[in-house]
């Protein structure tokens, strides 16, 4: 009987802590890349620990009167984004997208209660937009995210993600798109080290 209670306890603990990791940025690393204008530059990196095995990063500079450089890299398990002073734009991080055409992931997130984004350090993110694409529509989330000191997690309850189409199903997510915005005149810096469902 004691063994049965221990086994049930282990199973319940496992289920309570089950995660669906989208990216921990331990793979698909690259050195700092710089961007100064609105191009369609897209960086594709592969890894078995990346959802759908491929990550697309699309940096977009929309306002840059001083000709400065947005810088992006993935190093030491962290996606690092730095918009300088008086430069605005966004960095899109996508999963399920490839150079030669999209590759649906068919993720089932229906059993999870929240989507979590872990920031490795103080981050001055201004806007966070997320879109889930499925074969029967899409669902989205948008929020102004305040700056915080030190390491922190931005939690999004799955029921906060609004369906644009009534047929969209969390059990069939083909593509994920995260957009991290810089909107303030002071610039914007981010260090993201994990994205997952829990």
Image (cartoon, helix red, strand yellow):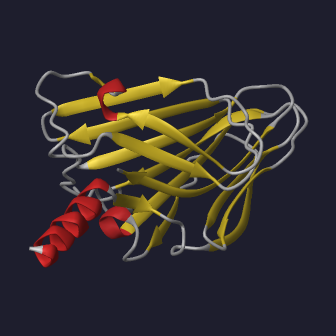
Visible residue check, residue 8:
yes
Marks counted in the figure total 0
Please indicate whether residue 102 sits to the left or right of residue 146 in the image.
left
Using the rendered view, name the quadrant where residue 26 is placed.
Answer: bottom right
Given residues 68 and 54, the one toward you in this image is 54
* 34 left or right, relative to 65: left
Q: Position of residue 35 (x, y in %)?
A: 73, 51
Q: Position of residue 143 (x, y in %)?
A: 53, 24
Q: Position of residue 126 (x, y in %)?
A: 68, 29
Say if 52 sits above or below 126 in the image. Answer: below
Is residue 64 rendered to the left or right of residue 197?
right
Q: Residue 62, can we see it?
A: no
Compared with 68, 106 (above or below) is below
Q: Nearer the viewer, residue 178 or 97?
A: 178
Location of the N terminus by quadrant is: bottom left
Residue at x 27%, y 45% (from the top left corner):
112
Image coords of residue 63 (percent x, y): 75, 30
In this picture, is 71 found above or below 83?
A: below
The residue under the point 73% across, 34% down is 147
What residue is shown at x 29% (from left), y 54% (from top)?
16
């Amino acid at each position: 009987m004691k063994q049965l209670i221990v086994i049930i306890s282990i199973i319940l603990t496992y289920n309570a802590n089950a995660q669906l990791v989208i990216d921990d940025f331990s793979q698909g690393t690259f050195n700092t890349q710089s961007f100064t204008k609105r191009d369609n530059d897209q960086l594709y990196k592969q890894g078995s620990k990346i959802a759908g095995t491929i990550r697309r990063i699309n940096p977009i500079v929309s306002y840059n009167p001083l000709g400065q450089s947005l810088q992006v890299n993935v190093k030491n398990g962290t996606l690092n984004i730095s918009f300088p002073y008086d430069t605005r734009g966004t960095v899109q991080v996508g999963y399920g997208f490839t150079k030669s055409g999209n590759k649906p992931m068919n993720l089932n997130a229906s059993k999870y209660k929240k989507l979590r984004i872990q920031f490795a350090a103080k981050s001055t993110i201004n806007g966070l937009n997320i879109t889930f694409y499925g074969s029967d529509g899409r669902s989205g989330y948008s929020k102004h995210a305040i700056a915080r000191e030190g390491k922190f997690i931005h939690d999004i309850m799955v029921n906060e993600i609004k369906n644009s189409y009534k047929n969209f199903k969390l059990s069939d997510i083909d593509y994920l798109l995260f957009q991290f915005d810089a909107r303030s005149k002071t610039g914007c810096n981010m260090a993201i080290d994990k994205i997952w469902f829990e």
